[in-house]
Amino acid sequence: MPLPAQFSPAATFEAPLEMLAACHGRIRRQCETLRRLVPHVAAHGADQQARQAAQAVLRYFDTAAVHHHRDEEQDLFPALLEAMAGSDAVCLRELSEGLRAEHRELDACWRALRSGLQRLAEGDAAGFQADAARALAQAYEQHIAREDAELLPLAARLLDANALREIGQAMQTRRGLGATPRP
């Protein structure tokens, strides 16, 4: 079971919307790995490929996916709401609240899968729950499709260069990288 490339050409913190969109691509690849892992484990158990795939998915969803949700909730959603100040922001509030709720649902799906995936990464296929893997992959696919179709185009239309720069700097700082000074 060949694993998909774990990293794609990365957008920079100076282009946070592109960075979020690139993250969606990486999430899709991790979901594809989960989908392919289900029949692979059924056929081969916790062989080396299954363990490596499980470890890669664990690393991704324990770190990058967590950062991604925080980037949206702590930086992008508030910036969009501020950009809408003074006008009817009801639709935007509903969108951001709905996406926040989906983040909580995704977190719950991840928690349901994580321990079995951890056991698989350690060589025990018995705890791997195929239904939980499929559920997480499907939930993420639907969620990022909504963000790609609604959230990111809205952000590109409403946020100016200063707001985007602030979002990118906040994302960078949250990862402990510090913001690079601008000339």
Image: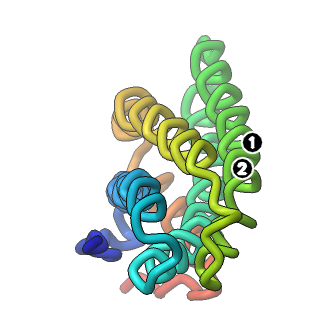
Label 2 crowd bin: few (<14), some (14–19), many (20+), radius 10 Å: some
Q: Is residue 20 visible?
A: no
Residue 68 position, x and y percent, is 56, 59
**Pointer 1 and pointer 2: residues touching (CB < 8 Å)?**
yes
Label 1 crowd bin: few (<14), some (14–19), many (20+), radius 10 Å: few
**Label 1 to label 2: alpha-carbon separation:** 5 Å
Residue at 39% x, 34% y: name it: 145
Q: Is residue 70 left or right of residue 159?
A: right
Name the quarter where the N terminus is drawn. bottom left
Q: How many badges with numbers are in the image?
A: 2
Label 1: element kind? helix
Name the quarter where the C terminus is drawn. bottom left
Residue 86 occupies which quadrant of the picture? Answer: top right
Residue at 57% x, 77% y: name it: 59
Question: Of all residues shown, which one is farthest toward the front?
Answer: 43
The residue at which mark 2 appears reads as 107
Residue 24 position, x and y percent, is 39, 52
Residue 147 occupies which quadrant of the picture? Answer: top left
Q: Is residue 13 visible?
A: yes
Label 2: element kind? helix
What type is the residue that disc 1 sits on? Arg
Residue 169 occupies which quadrant of the picture? Answer: bottom right
Q: Nearer the viewer, residue 156 or 28?
A: 28
Residue 171 position, x and y percent, is 57, 68
Q: Which mark is residue 96?
A: none
Q: As displayed, is residue 12 above or below residue 150? A: below
Q: Which mark is residue 104?
A: 1
Residue at 54% x, 82% y: name it: 179
What type is the residue that disc 2 sits on? Asp
